[in-house]
Amino acid sequence: MAEKIIIFDTTLRDGEQSPGASMNVEEKLRVARQLERLNVDVIEAGFPMASDGDFEAVEVIAKTIEGCQIAALARADIADIDRAWEAVRYAKRPRIHTFIATSDIHLKYKLKKTKEQVLEDVARAVSHAKGYTDDVEFSAEDATRSDLKYLCQVIETAIEAGATTINIPDTVGYAIPSEFSQVIRTIKGQVPNIDRATISVHCHNDLGLAVANSLAAIESGARQVECTINGIGERAGNASLEEIVMAIRVRKDLLDVYTDVNTEQIYPTSRLVSTITGMVVQPNKAVVGANAFAHEAGIHQDGILKEKTTYEIMTPDSVGIPKSSLVLGKHSGRHAFREKLKELGYELTSTELDIAFQRFKKVADQKKVVYDEDIIAIVEDEIFRIPDRYKLIHINVQSGTVTIPTATVQMEVDGRVVQDAGFGDGPVDAALKTIQKITKSKSRLVRFSVAAITGGTDAQGEVTVKIEEDDQTAIGQGASTDIIIASAKAYINALNKLEYRKKRLRGL
Ligand code: KIV
Ligand code: ZN
């Protein structure tokens, strides 16, 4: 009979460790709510000892999310475990996830400890965590570069101390599938008390093998997989949740396992994580990329028209990609708009719906057709913005072949109307420099990217900017059919987020 694979999502912890992917507490809660809709089994909500922001996020998620187990990460250290428990204890089903490195390289250079000392740390940490909750996960960091005999000894010690899940991380993405599979088989065969724990794997993607390694481990008996939405994570990222879940579903004939993931929520979740982190999904990304279900070659199109299964191994609906990207227009009413939002994974209050609908009507007046992507941009832009210190009132930009690009901007700053004008190397530069002058921001622009949300010259442009000041970064997004307005909005959104972050750091 098919066995269940526990899906442990670490988007909010390892995923958030991706360069530039940091999220604030409200954003993490939104992702957690969506992960609950996706029906993952475990949400790793953060590493409470790492920062006050992480602590707060774990605590809020533990208090709010009821449909998933909530895990908090801690080093194999008493103070870390106490802090993790303080944050996660409100969860209906809390888990403490404690880890220590086991490879010679890490022992010698990072921990400066002997193998015996690490064994003592494992026993102490796991039994301390067990004093708080029955559900304790232990990870042997850098397991795939550890001496296998020693690794087995560490695992036996962790289980003896009470660990119920044993996680085998390929921390640096070094393993290849046949080798990793053998590691899991050895653990199953050599660790005497292994039947008292679930074997989990956690693969990084440095060689592009994270998903392949995770599937190989499943074939060898692993029953929990740690993964992230869109595969985000440290360096080249983690194993991608959507790829693992869909591989299990599409190839159930070979793998004989299943997950409880609601696959129709995959696409909305991918889109949400991408929007919040500002990490764009590559068009050819498996399962959720813009081209994942696009058939370009004539021979393929012909085959698809005759019979979908000729070139499609799964359907777009099975991963929640809306059936048609052309849906609403200027004659669409509030009801159709609300239904569309539901389909896209948004549950809005009636006030929020009113605000979003008004903006939709404006966009629909400017464009002949409004695509799903446009609607997502509207909702993100209008509804999920943090309290704004800076607001754009209007912007006017002049540019051309014989004019120095000039921007005139009027804004609200702390409720006061301020305006100014400035020059730049182009219209966007002029707009952003003028906004910077008005806000007196000392931040530095470190990333600026523009994407057309939909095709055609009337497409909405989505601008993403990243700014930095005193080691704090913020990502802002803005959408409009006018690229300069989208840029100004994105920049102001980032400035507001940075202000918000600075305020929180000052404890205000
Ligand atoms: O990659 C890793 O080893 C980790 C552990 C903390 C599980 O993220
Ligand atoms: Zn990791």
Image: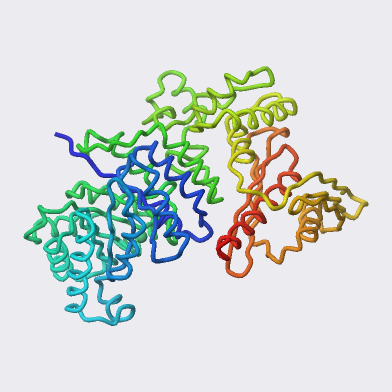
Pick whichever, 78 or 245, lies toward us.
78
| Residue 294 visible in image | no
Residue sticking out furthest to the right: 402
State the image coordinates of residue 74 (x, y, percent, origin top left).
Answer: 32, 64
Pick whichever, 240 or 114, lies toward us.
114
- The image quarter containing residue 174 is bottom left
Residue 284 located left or right of residue 163: right
Please say if 131 is above or below 306.
below
Quadrant occupied by the N terminus: top left
Quadrant occupied by the C terminus: bottom right
Residue under the image location 76 percent in, 63 percent down: 440
Quarter of the image where ligand 2 sits: bottom left
Please say if 78 is above or below 224.
below
State the image coordinates of residue 55 (x, y, percent, origin top left).
Answer: 42, 60
Pick whichever, 113 or 109, lies toward us.
113
| Residue 145 visible in image | yes
Residue under the image location 29 percent in, 67 percent down: 142
